[in-house]
Amino acid sequence: MTQRRRCVRMNVLTDLWGGYLSSLDAQPLLTKCLTSGVILPAADIAAQLIEKRGDPSAPRGIDFTRTSRWLAAGFLLHAPWNHYWYNFLDARVPPPTEPLSGINFLRLALDQFLQAPVFTALFFAVLQLLEGANTQGVRDKLSRDWWSTMKTNWVVWLPASFINLAFVPTALKLLYVNVVFYFWSIFLSIVANRDVEPQKQT
């Protein structure tokens, strides 16, 4: 019976993976948007649970308005940005056959020291704007948290991005990013909502 259940589970996983690959081939951008639109809000919910565990006075329950902002950011920003970025990078600086090559280190430098700082700033800005912050509120948030976030980003993403750029096919790069980004988003969600008192439009 146990063996049969394992076989059923394997068949289900195989079917799901096959369906994902088929969707990725037929509708790559939409599939990536839907994937990010699930992973990022799930990470925010995890972040909220962590925050509540560390603060007994915090309101009970999940703030689904906050989570919806992460859904919007994942669907409308994270997935399209990374979809076009990796396609652009692989077209302009094609991956070599040898992972430990100067070209791959150039690709890593472009990804982490050009793309990542811009994306992180834009990501914080979009979340702040979705919360109702004005331009000064966005500037204050970036001034307070952008640089410290980038330093942590490079600890996590330099090795993760090297693996992605060296070994992962272009079509699956965003899926790999999303797996790592789930855990990274928990950190980002905590930072993005830390000491936030957005300056509203008047």
Image: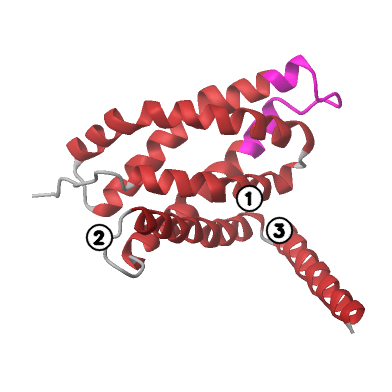
Q: Residue sitting at 34 percent across and 60 percent down?
A: 66
Q: Amino acid at mark 2?
A: Ser
Does the segment drawn in magenta span residue 103? yes
Quote the CA–CA distance across marks 2 and 1. Answer: 32 Å
Read off the magenta span: 86-105
Element under label 2? loop
Q: Residue sitting at 43 percent across and 44 percent down?
A: 188
Q: Nearer the viewer, residue 17 or 47?
A: 47
Q: Nearer the viewer, mark 2 or mark 1?
A: 2
Q: Are marks 2 and 3 in contact (CB under 8 Å)?
A: no
Q: Image quadrant for the N terminus? A: bottom right
Give the left or right position of residue 128, taking residue 105 as reference: left
Q: To which residue does mark 2 refer?
A: 57
Q: Are marks 2 and 1 in contact (CB under 8 Å)?
A: no
Element under label 1? helix
Residue 76 in the image, given as x and y percentages of width and height: 46, 54
User: Tag on residue 24?
Assistant: 3
Residue 50 in the image, given as x and y percentages of width and height: 42, 55
Residue furthest to the bottom in view is 1
Tell which circle, 2 or 1, labels the residue nearer the N-terminal end.
2
Height in image: 165 above or below 60? above
Q: To which residue does mark 1 refer?
A: 179
Residue furthest to the left in view is 202
Q: Nearer the viewer, residue 61 or 185?
A: 61
Q: Amino acid at mark 1?
A: Val
Q: To which quarter of the image does residue 95 belong? A: top right
Q: Amino acid at mark 3?
A: Leu
